[in-house]
Amino acid sequence: MRQRGAVAFAAALVALLAAGLWLGGHPSYLPGFARDTFVEEPGGLSGEAAEILERNYWRKTGPIELGNASLQGMVRELRRRHHDRFTEYFSPENLESFNQQIEGRFSGIGLSVAEVKQGLRVVQVFPGSPAAEAGIEVGEVVVSVNGESIAGVNSAEATKKIKGPEGTEVTIGVLDPRTKKTRELTLTRAEVSLPNVSQKLEKVAGKELGYVRMLSFSQDSGAQLKRAVEKVEDEGAEGILLDLRHNPGGLLDQAVQSASIFLPEGEVVVTTKSRTQGDSTHESVGGNLPAKPLVVLVDGGTASAAEILTAALVDDGDATTVGETTYGKGVFQEEHGLDNGGALKITVGEYFTPDGENLAKTHGIHPDVRVPLDPEAKGDNQKTRALRVLAGKVGA
């Protein structure tokens, strides 16, 4: 009888695991909120399951591994049930990597890239980085990492292969689209600080144009953007090209501050709706610079706060968009730290453009001038076209 009961319990446990519904783990492995919410008492099913696994699983396991699995199980079920791509559990190690990206620093070789069929096309090489010292150029394509092809691998996974601890080596295959030749380079990873906002004066069709690139909406990025725009305007820029390609977003308040550079006080930048936080309208805060012709360059990597800024500049600032359709996020998250040193990044609401659109439902912002990335073009064909569009607006 006892044996049949054990078999029945094991079968039930396997069924739960297979269905992806195991939200347990021993109560002592979970942070306080999860213990209170998901475990009624220490002797419950989840506690028994964790103890059985730790004692009997064919490979040695322990509290950290089971605790991480418990939290990942919760997140997977919520993502599946509510079609949510963005709620995440970060282990302490993954949280450190995430925070480095938000703060504009990481350990790698110093490239900004875009996903293409063959691998990763180089969009920017950061000065002083291992990539710059190795002579990698914009337009070249990383096609392999440590001897393995990355063709068809999504950009998140491919860049993860390239990044790694400072001082370690990585070997990449770099294709020159012009010569069709690939060379192998072994680089030593280093701590790379991203220049979150950069600027340059460009001359096109006799017009002086300011080119400003912004990589993320991290702390103080709105102030950095304002300084960059002021600099090119002081140098004589007659219009501004704002490059938000591959910008994954970041802090909402920085999107509002950035919009306030271009829009007069009181313009709606974004509205948000949240079950727990209520509904809010975020408006530009004033201190805008004199209006000039404006073009925003976007692509499929333009997401979240970057889409909020783009939509506000289109709806309220007469900006023209050039490039490819943006990501289409439409929801926002907040981070909650956990007792184990990790964190939950939880979707807590939706956001809407000044025109009332949710970008998840419209599948992103569709540019006024569509320009697909040409991996075989010499230089940056999207930027070249955007500058021409801006020169046309200046001359109109």
Image (spheres, helix red, strand yellow):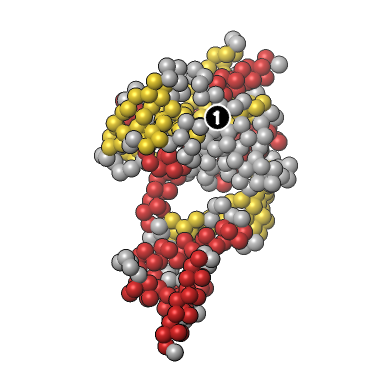
Residue at image x 43%, y 56%?
Answer: 90
Residue 28: percent from left, percent from top = 39, 74
Tell me the quarter of the picture where residue 147 sits.
Answer: top left
Q: Residue at x 43, y 71 (%)?
A: 25
* Image position, residue 116 (x, y; %): 51, 32
Q: Residue furthest right?
A: 355
Q: In this orientation, does residue 112 appear?
A: yes
Residue at point 58%, 59% (across, down): 80
Is residue 182 or residue 325 the one in the foreground?
A: 182
> Is any atom of residue 201 visible in this view?
no
Quarter of the picture containing the N terminus is: bottom left
Element type at mark 1: strand
Judging by the rendered image, the residue that carries numbered circle 1 is 243
Q: Is residue 292 above or below residue 197?
A: above
Which x, y percent locates residue 322?
A: 63, 27
Residue lying farthest to the top in this orientation: 206
Residue 138, image x and y in percent?
44, 24
Identify the image quadrant of residue 310: top right
Q: 277 or 161, which is in the foreground? A: 161
